[in-house]
Amino acid sequence: MKPGPRNLITDIAGLRVGNAEDHRVRTGSTVVVGDRPFTAAVHVMGGAPGTRETDLLAPDKLVQEVDALVLSGGSAFGLDAASGVADGLRGLGRGFDVGGQKVPIVPGAILFDLLNGGDKSWDENPYKGLGRAALMAAAADFALGTAGAGTGALVHDLKGGLGSASVVLESGITVGALVAVNALGRVTVGVGPEFWAAPFEMGGEFGGLGLGRGFDPGAEPPLMKRLGEATTIAIVATDAALTKAQAQRMAVAAHDGMARAIVPAHTPFDGDLVFAAATGARPLADPVLDPFLIGHAAATCLARAIARGVHASTARAGDLMPSWAARHGG
């Protein structure tokens, strides 16, 4: 397999991504929207998740497709970003038809960025507006790093960020990942600069630094964030025709990529979550082999996307933690 032409989740035809940020507040929102509704699922492994409309993604639920998926900063306030996206989609005539009324289906997840130095003294929750702005900005190309839901993200000792990556399998199936990295754990080996995701890097996409040598297998990780302050939220997607159950298995497999790129991952203090999306454009040639390969590709893409998000983060005045580039001169 090899990266897609953009090395972004939007290498999957029919998917677009939009970002919106408020750098004064140090926060933002990101939306993935399809040209048409798509199959979606979710799997949660963190101990402190914040979500909207995830129950309906179970395989046995009535609604089989969604209109968009939202990742946002803002902790519980950020769940309102999905309301802004839903309003925008309804204005476009999109949504699940209920007796002639269009009800856009927009699951979402949030990360905690309320203690990152930004001005949070708003009179009105800004996230509904950020969600709608992100929808209106949706396109095939979008910014990584300090952008969208990754704007105010922090990891163990660095700025976090928004990352993405893709691969095209030999079968022609495309798989991609999008992630807002706000983890308790480290994404670099020790103080870096090498990334835990290095074995899966393609084409020097996050510096080509290779494997780190500062790993102590007996080290006990310090608790740098408090309860509820972390979370890495992600979307993995494919153009393959998957059922909701198969999409859920793709989400489960993708969590391996999170664990390869963040140490430690899935802690009681993180709300780690992966959505899965399948546009259904490409039928499965082999119903056994193809889902297996898609799951592996999703994990690989997510590990790479996590490193890319932190690698692409940019320094801004007032940062509480340095960006990767500011610390390592890259």
Image: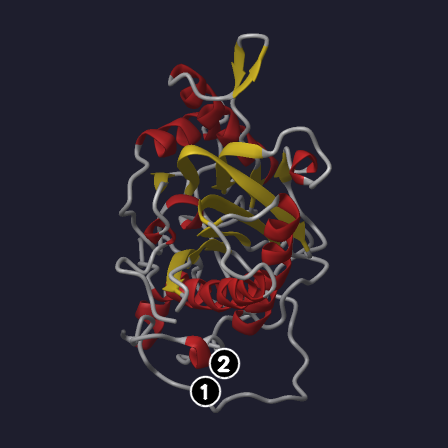
Residue under the image location 43 percent in, 68 percent down: 304
The quadrant in which residue 98 appears is: top right
Q: Quadrant of the C terminus?
A: bottom left
- SS assignment at label 2: loop
Say whether residue 322 is visible: no
Q: Residue furthest front?
A: 285
Q: Earlier in the sequence, mark 1 or mark 2?
A: 2
Residue at the spot 55% in from the left edge and 28% down from the top edge: 105
Tell me which corner region of the image, top left, top right, bottom left or bottom right, holds residue 39. Answer: top right
Residue 179 position (above or below residue 91): below
| Residues marked 1 and 2 touching at CB (< 8 Å) | yes
Q: Which residue is mark 1?
A: 212
- Give the image location of residue 225, x and y in percent: 61, 60
Residue under the point 59% across and 57% down: 250
Q: Nearer the viewer, residue 63 or 319?
A: 63
Residue 72 sits above or below residue 99 on the image = below
Residue at 64% over, 56% down: 249
Position in image of residue 197 (x %, y %): 47, 75
The CA distance from mark 1 to mark 2 is 6 Å
Q: Position of residue 118 (x, y in %)?
A: 43, 43
Residue 183 in view of the camera: yes
Q: Residues within 10 Å of mark 1 (few under 14, many from 20)?
A: some
Q: Is residue 328 left or right of residue 259?
A: left
Read off the residue under disc 2: 189
Q: Is residue 165 above or below residue 107?
A: below
Between 168 and 134, the residue placed more toward the observer is 168
